[in-house]
Amino acid sequence: MLKKIIVSLFKEKLPEINNLQQLPDDVFYEYILERGIMLLRGFFRFGRFCFIGKNVCVKCKKRIKLGKFATIHDGSYIDASSQKGIIIEDYCTLGRNTYLRTGNVSSYQGYFIMRTRSSCNNNCFLGATGGLEIGENVLIGPNVTIITEKHNYEDIDAVIKEQGILQIPVTIENNVWIGANVVVLGGVVIKEGAIIGAGSIINKSVNSKEIVAGNPARLIKKRDEGTPDS
Ligand SMILES: CC(C)(COP(=O)(O)OP(=O)(O)OC[C@H]1O[C@@H](n2cnc3c(N)ncnc32)[C@H](O)[C@@H]1OP(=O)(O)O)[C@@H](O)C(=O)NCCC(=O)NCCS
């Protein structure tokens, strides 16, 4: 009975809650309790309806725009200390132990934008100091690393550390799926509907609806054509 009331209260705002009805009662109530605590924490920390886990560390909170029912899971570190800061739209999720940073002492130009209903799984490193935009409905698997800067190294006689940093933004368009343990290097655009195989290194842009995999990643299939000829 209580289960039905909870589901009917939230089904307009959180359509996914309908799936929870099939869960055994103990699992359902444990999930609802955890979400309830996260919602309260979100309300007190951000003044709006969002879900915030335990031990979430936030720097420069004023530079973060958090959408409704967005989730930041336990142990995440979110640093928005850049001019443009962080935008996380409605229903987005950052998994446990996400490390997300848009600025540091030598760089304030970074930004992070995550559009509606996108998510990243646990233990992702989202280095957005050079700028990172993620479209709508993007799925990012666990342990993914995204890099948006590189060290200059042209002067052979100088220490690499002292040659400065180049910012090279990354864009991930709508409806992309990135598998587990992928590394995305700076300057890359992953176009709409592309899929990145688990463990891949992405050092070049990926075309729309392509499936790429490996180190460095190569085309393995086109979603609209089957396997490539060569
Ligand atoms: C990329 C992926 C979706 C492709 O799946 P698929 O369409 O079923 O492709 P197939 O398994 O038929 O593989 C096609 C070819 O690509 C190769 N391949 C597939 N995935 C690969 C990967 N991650 N790295 C390297 N090669 C890969 C296969 O070995 C096969 O090569 P072959 O034809 O020479 O034997 C899948 O392999 C994958 O990596 N999924 C990610 C899963 C994941 O990380 N989930 C995390 C939760 S979000």
Image: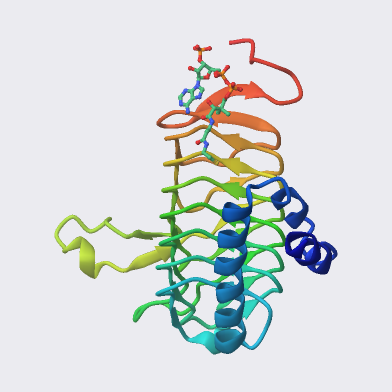
Question: Residue at coordinates 55% horizontally, 81% vertically from top-left?
Answer: 41
The residue nearer to you, when weighing 175 against 128, is 175
The answer to whether residue 84 is visible is: no
Q: Quadrant of residue 222?
A: top right
Q: How many marks?
A: 0
Q: Position of residue 169 (x, y in %)?
A: 53, 60
Relative side of 14 to 172, left or right? right
Q: Position of residue 82 (x, y in %)?
A: 49, 81
Q: Quadrant of residue 90?
A: bottom right
Which image quarter holds the C terminus? top right
Relative side of 74 to 93, left or right? left
Question: Residue at coordinates 42% horizontally, 41% vertically from top-left?
Answer: 181
The residue nearer to you, when weighing 107 against 221, is 221
Q: Is residue 158 above or below residue 137?
A: below
Question: Residue at coordinates 50% horizontally, 58% vertically from top-left?
Answer: 95
The residue nearer to you, when weighing 62 against 159, is 62
Q: Position of residue 126 (x, y in %)?
A: 46, 60
